[in-house]
Amino acid sequence: MEDRQDSYEDIINREHPTSAVHPRMPLQDRAAQFSPFAALTGFEDYISDAERQSLETLSR
């Protein structure tokens, strides 16, 4: 089996390609592109509900 590091040896030290025509997109805009595909839609609400229930149980 080939060592993973050896498989990238020819490209690992190359400079990252940069377009002269298209400026790099800001990271915040890049993240916004993928936000509709969030795998855990509704997870924040679930966690908030669980926290609320736990606090109610502890305060009794």
Image: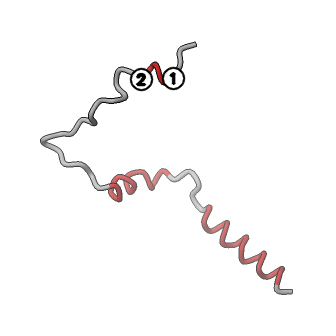
Question: Residue 3, how many percent across, how many down?
Answer: 53, 19
Q: How crowded is mark 2: few (under 14 residues within 10 Å), some or many (20 or more)?
A: few
Q: Nearer the viewer, residue 25 or 33?
A: 25
Question: Residue 30, how many percent across, how many down?
Answer: 35, 52
User: From what the image shows, is residue 3 above or below residue 46?
Assistant: above
* Residue 4, disc: 1
User: From what the image shows, is residue 58 above or below residue 17?
Assistant: below
What's the image's color scheme? secondary structure
Amino acid type shown at disc 2: Tyr
Identified at 60% across, 62% down, the residue is: 42
* Residue 8, disc: 2
* Residue 42, disc: none
Quadrant containing the C terminus is bottom right
Q: Which of 44 and 22 is in front in this view?
A: 22
Structural distance between the alpha carbons of marks 1 and 2? 7 Å
Asked whether, in this view, residue 42 is left or right of residue 28, the answer is right
Quadrant containing the N terminus is top right
Provide the secondary structure element on which disc 2 rests.
loop
Identified at 39% across, 54% down, the residue is: 31
Is there a contact, CB below 8 Å, between mark 1 and mark 2?
Answer: yes
Q: How crowded is mark 1: few (under 14 residues within 10 Å), some or many (20 or more)?
A: few
Asked whether, in this view, residue 1 is left or right of residue 15, the answer is right
User: From what the image shows, is residue 28 above or below residue 57?
Assistant: above
Identified at 66% across, 72% down, the residue is: 48
Amino acid type shown at disc 1: Arg
Question: Residue 51, how many percent across, how many down?
Answer: 71, 73
Residue found at the far bottom of this picture: 60
